[in-house]
């Protein structure tokens, strides 16, 4: 395990083409020694990012969604980046002028940085009103979703109405997209003249950044394809049609004359506009229209903050907002960020005056443009396709990397203090010597406490009024002084602790708290207080430790607060890995004995509230072998507390029908179900494997034979499944996932059959979308009075798995 102290934070905002290059290269062997001691973080709104060069081919139908999208979570796993799945909303600079923090939109504390890069793309310049009725090309991911919806709508349309599409913008991107749209829709729609595509161009000439020969070629091709071009047209607004819900009205001036036209879809592909938050809260210099000004090193007016791609403007001269420039910025950016942290001289990039543009025409034909040169032909499409596919392949098929590093360059650059800290890292103290420093801890607790007070002021009434703020967090005393539970209530105590399995400390904190509260929820108890045991990775810089703990404990505090549970205190220390656990105290309501694990009877139904497979899924994620969409689905479900489920099963409508409850965690579905069965009483279970909800990412991992390290131990319980050999043959992946260890898993509920479907319906209404009846309790042969070897075999056969 790597125990190198952390010295600096390098943060990327956005998953643009320049950052994609950086993400890949930082995972390569040649950069490993330079990155030792640097915490790497990517903040991105989307984990699946499209490659702009293949967008027209995707629209034409030549590429699938998967072929033209990159999975940023895989690249982060490859390079060791923390993945923060959120949108940046602002940047603040420290008073010293060095470093700062990034605010994001998911409520977490600001994320610190020592070096920062912004690559968040751009948006089209919208018309004055009606932007909600248009489909902007950028952000590209949003366009891809809207385009897919349009294709589905056109494909299912049997009305024989004319499909009219407008593309606003006659630059290279607009014309290329226009021809792609025209090509795809005419393939889908049967019947001549059912597709009309119109381009609206502000000036008299389309493709104004290209030479006259290129414009002449495209004028001819547009005419041949019956694509209408409206020149000298300026779009002013878009309104919804009152007569047809599937049409919009585009208002524009044509040769200074106001006019309007109806369209099925209006695609916006005009000149680029900066992201709104850059225009309002950027701490560095920008152009008048909000683009980040950078020099030839891609550095902004603030040292250590860089930018690349469409969101920036080079002081040396304007270049088109094209992916080719962002791609070429990547190598300079990746080295200059490290050069800045090391105190080395930055590298200058000489901007090229001309570049080769390959503009496709929708039908596997393309036009080449460079300076005054123009050429067309099908062979150019093949060339473009080869270049694009090869580029994408280089970012999807990542090499297995060795982890063999000696002395970090960042430590050498920081002087004697940092060098000494690195040398002492393997011999860092244990015991109380491993505690986080008092001043750091004081600042962490103050930040978490102030954040929670603000939440309490703005929140609805506490779901558990007895979890008032303990005096320890106010007075910093040695113990938390908490109010006792109400009279005639029984107290409950539970504890959980584990190492981080994801790179985002805020989300890890939330999941840890959800997981730790789950035992209380399974009993129907109300959590009251929690004590945390937090481990932060070694760091020389106190601010890095402070940032990590604030993020992790804030995520945990949010989850606890939502359940009416107070974070009463805890213990923090240094360690090799980010880790977190909680000792939770709660109580059972008056006259309620709580749900126990045992108690089901034959004909009772078995209900599961969440999907299964987090262990295998995140084992695959560690190896860079899981799709980012699958990862996001799992995290969203793991962040979902079982608190609402507990309230449902303790509701008078269901409480008498519920016979036994537990939560599905480390022992897996079968392991925890076995705890609910009673061999002596002849109580077994039958599971319907087709009804059990599994994460798609877990099934994908199982197909690659990737499982959790606890899988082998859990599979010892397969001896209790009487037909496990048959199930393993018919359902090879799902059969093994029955033993997959879960983190923040769902509740496993045994209840009377007549109320089971009503319970599932209530669960789904409350957000447990994958809740399902997965089986029933059955009678099994009881052991004989004499016991013996035969009865020991009966003990092993408590569960049957059926289709």
Image (cartoon, rainbow, N blue to C red):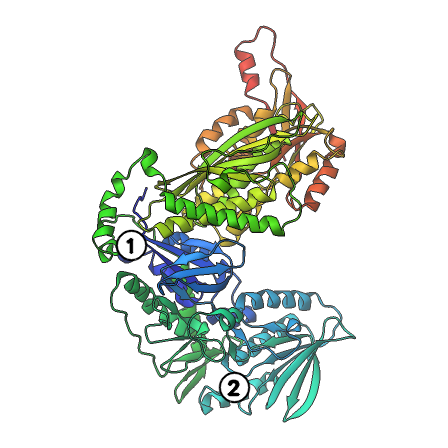
Q: Residue at x 70, y 40 (%)?
A: 760
Q: Residue at x 54, y 88 (%)?
A: 220
Other-residue count near label 1 (Cα within 10 Å), few / some / many at <14 / 14–19 / ≥20: many
Left or right: where does residue 384 sit relative to residue 234? left
Pointer 1 with pointer 2, Cβ within 8 A: no
- Closer to us: 110 or 759: 110
Residue 672 in percent (x, y) is at: 56, 29
Left or right: where does residue 383 sit relative to residue 274? left
Q: Residue furthest front?
A: 475
In the displayed structure, would residue 282 be above or below residue 615? below
At numbered mark 1, what does the secondary structure look like: helix, strand or loop?
Answer: helix
Does residue 505 appear in this view? no
Residue beneath disc 2: 218
Question: In the figure, residue 241 lies in which quadrant?
Answer: bottom right
- Closer to us: 368 or 89: 89
Looking at the image, is mark 1 or mark 2 earlier in the sequence?
Answer: 1
Other-residue count near label 2 (Cα within 10 Å), few / some / many at <14 / 14–19 / ≥20: many
Residue beneath disc 1: 32
Does residue 344 appear in this view? yes
Residue 756 in percent (x, y) is at: 72, 35
- Closer to us: 4 or 33: 4
Residue 373 in percent (x, y) is at: 39, 88
Q: Quadrant of the C terminus?
A: top right
Q: Residue furthest left?
A: 416
Q: Residue at x 34, y 79 (%)?
A: 351
Residue 699 in percent (x, y) is at: 52, 44
Task: Measure the C-alpha gap from mark 1 to mark 2.
Answer: 48 Å
């Amino acid at each position: 395990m790597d125990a190198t102290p952390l010295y600096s934070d390098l943060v990327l905002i956005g998953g643009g083409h320049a950052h994609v290059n950086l993400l890949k290269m930082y995972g390569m062997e040649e950069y490993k020694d330079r990155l030792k001691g640097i915490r790497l973080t990517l903040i991105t709104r989307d984990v699946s990012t499209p490659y702009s060069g293949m967008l027209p081919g995707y629209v034409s139908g030549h590429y699938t969604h998967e072929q033209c999208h990159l999975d940023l979570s895989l690249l982060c796993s490859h390079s060791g980046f923390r993945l923060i799945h959120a949108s940046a909303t602002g940047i603040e600079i420290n008073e010293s002028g060095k470093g700062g923090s990034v605010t994001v939109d998911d409520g977490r504390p600001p994320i610190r940085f020592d070096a920062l890069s912004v690559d968040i793309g751009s948006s089209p310049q919208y018309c004055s009103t009606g932007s909600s009725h248009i489909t902007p090309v950028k952000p590209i991911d949003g366009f891809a979703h809207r385009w897919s919806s349009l294709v589905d709508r056109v494909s299912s349309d049997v009305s024989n109405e004319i499909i009219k599409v407008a593309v606003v913008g006659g630059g290279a991107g607009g014309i290329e997209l226009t021809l792609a749209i025209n090509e795809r829709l005419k393939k889908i729609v049967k019947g001549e003249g059912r597709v009309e595509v119109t381009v609206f161009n502000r000036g008299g000439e389309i493709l104004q950044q290209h030479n006259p020969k290129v414009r002449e070629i495209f004028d001819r091709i547009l005419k041949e394809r019956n694509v209408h071009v409206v020149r000298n047209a300026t779009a002013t607004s878009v309104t919804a049609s009152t007569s047809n819900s599937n049409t919009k009205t585009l208002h524009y001036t044509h040769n200074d004359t106001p006019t309007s036209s109806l369209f099925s879809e209006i695609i916006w592909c005009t000149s680029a506009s900066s992201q709104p938050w850059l225009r309002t809260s950027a701490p560095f210099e920008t152009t008048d229209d909000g683009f980040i000004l950078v020099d030839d090193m891609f550095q902004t007016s603030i040292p250590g903050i860089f930018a690349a791609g469409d969101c920036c403007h080079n002081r040396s001269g304007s270049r088109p907002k094209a992916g080719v420039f962002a791609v070429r910025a990547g190598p300079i950016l990746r080295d200059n960020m490290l050069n800045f942290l090391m105190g080395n001289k930055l590298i200058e990039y000489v901007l090229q005056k001309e570049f080769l543009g390959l503009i496709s025409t929708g039908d596997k034909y393309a036009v080449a443009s460079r300076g005054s040169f123009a050429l067309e032909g099908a062979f150019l499409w093949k060339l473009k396709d080869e270049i694009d596919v090869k580029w994408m392949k280089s970012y999807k098929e990542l090499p297995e990397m060795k982890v063999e590093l000696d002395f970090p360059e960042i430590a050498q650059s920081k002087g004697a203090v940092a060098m000494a800290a690195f040398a002492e890292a393997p011999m860092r103290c244990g015991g109380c010597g491993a505690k986080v420093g008092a001043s750091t801890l004081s600042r962490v607790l103050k930040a978490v406490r102030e954040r929670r007070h603000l939440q309490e002021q703005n929140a609805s009434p506490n779901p558990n009024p007895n979890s008032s703020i303990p005096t320890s967090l106010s007075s910093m005393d040695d113990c938390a002084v908490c109010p006792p539970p109400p009279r005639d209530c029984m107290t409950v105590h539970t504890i959980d602790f584990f190492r981080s399995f994801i790179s985002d400390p805020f989300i890890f904190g939330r999941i840890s708290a959800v997981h730790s509260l789950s035992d209380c929820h399974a009993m129907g108890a109300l959590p009251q207080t929690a004590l945390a045991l937090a481990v932060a990775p070694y760091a020389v810089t106190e601010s890095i430790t402070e940032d990590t703990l604030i993020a992790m404990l804030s995520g945990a505090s949010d989850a606890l607060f939502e359940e009416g549970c107070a974070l009463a205190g805890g213990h923090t220390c240094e360690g090799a890995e980010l880790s977190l656990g909680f000792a939770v105290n709660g109580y059972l309501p008056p006259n309620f004995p709580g749900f126990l694990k045992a108690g089901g009877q034959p004909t009772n139904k078995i209900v599961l509230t969440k999907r299964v497979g987090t262990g295998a899924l995140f084992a695959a994620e560690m190896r860079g072998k899981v799709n980012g969409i699958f990862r996001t689905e799992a995290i969203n479900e793991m962040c979902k507390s079982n608190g609402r489920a507990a309230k449902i099963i303790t509701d008078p409508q269901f409480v008498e029908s519920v016979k036994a409850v537990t939560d599905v965690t480390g022992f897996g579905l079968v392991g925890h179900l076995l705890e609910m069965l009673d061999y002596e009483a002849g109580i077994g279970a039958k599971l319907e494997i087709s009804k059990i909800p599994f994460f798609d990412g877990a099934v994908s991992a199982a197909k690659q034979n990737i499982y959790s390290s606890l899988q082998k131990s859990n599979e010892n319980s397969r001896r209790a499944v009487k037909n496990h050999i048959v199930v393993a043959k018919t359902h090879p992946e799902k059969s093994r996932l029955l033993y997959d260890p879960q983190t923040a898993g769902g509740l496993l509920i045994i209840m009377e059959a007549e109320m089971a479907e009503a319970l599932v319906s209530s669960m789904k209404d409350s957000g447990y979308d994958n809740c399902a009846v997965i089986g029933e309790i059955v009678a099994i042969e009881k052991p004989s009075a004499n016991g013996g070897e035969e009865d020991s075999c009966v003990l092993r056969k408590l569960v049957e798995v059926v289709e």
